[in-house]
Amino acid sequence: MAVRAPDNAEDAMPTLLSEAEVDVPAALRGPLDPIYPEDALHSHREADVVATVSVRSDGKVLGVRVVDAPTPGFAQAAEEALWGADFAPARKGKHPVSSTATLRIRFRVER
C-alpha cells in the first residue's frame, strides 16, 4: 500500500479498523473522476479496478493499495484519483474512526 510520510507526530499511522469492525464504513463524499488512460481510451477498453484505501478519522487518505487492475495504466489512474478523493470517515458508534475501505473504480468509455 502506498502510504505518504507523516508531516508530524500527529499524522503518525493511526490504528485502522476494517470495514467489518465499523458501524458505518468510510465513503466518498463526491464523485471520483479518474483520468482515463490514453491508450485504453483510444482503443475503447473498459475496466474495473479494485483498491483498498486507508482513511483517517478526519477523512484524509492515508494510503492506497490497488488490489486488482487489468493494466498498470488503469491501476495508476485509480490510485491517483483516490489520493485526491474526499472521504467521510468511518464511524464506530457516534465517533469517527480511521479505517480501510475497499472500492471498485469503473472505467467506462462514453458512447
Image (cartoon, grey):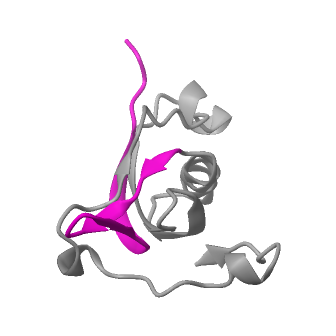
Quarter of the image for residue 75 reads: bottom right
Residue 78 x/y as whole percent: 54, 50
Is 109 situated above or below 34?
Answer: above
Residue placed most toward the observer, 62 or 9? 9
Q: Residue furthest top?
A: 111
Residue placed most toward the observer, 28 or 66? 28
Q: How many marks?
A: 0
For residue 105: magenta?
yes
Majority secondary structure in the magenta region: strand
Give the residue drawn at x 63%, y 46%.
84
Q: Which residues are magenta?
A: 86-111
Is 32 situated above or below 5?
Answer: above
Q: Residue furthest right?
A: 7
Q: Which quadrant is the N terminus positioned in?
A: bottom right
Give the residue drawn at x 62%, y 54%.
83
Quarter of the image for residue 90 reads: bottom left
Quarter of the image for residue 14 reads: bottom right
For residue 75: magenta?
no
Q: Is residue 77 left or right of residue 65?
A: right
Residue placed most toward the observer, 69 or 4? 4
Q: Which quadrant is the C terminus positioned in?
A: top left
Residue 36 x/y as whole percent: 58, 34
Residue placed most toward the observer, 55 or 81? 55
Q: Is residue 7 left or right of residue 102?
A: right
Q: Residue furthest front?
A: 94
Give the residue drawn at x 32%, y 67%.
95
Residue 85 x/y as whole percent: 55, 45
Residue 25 x/y as whole percent: 26, 62
Q: Is residue 18 left or right of residue 64?
A: left
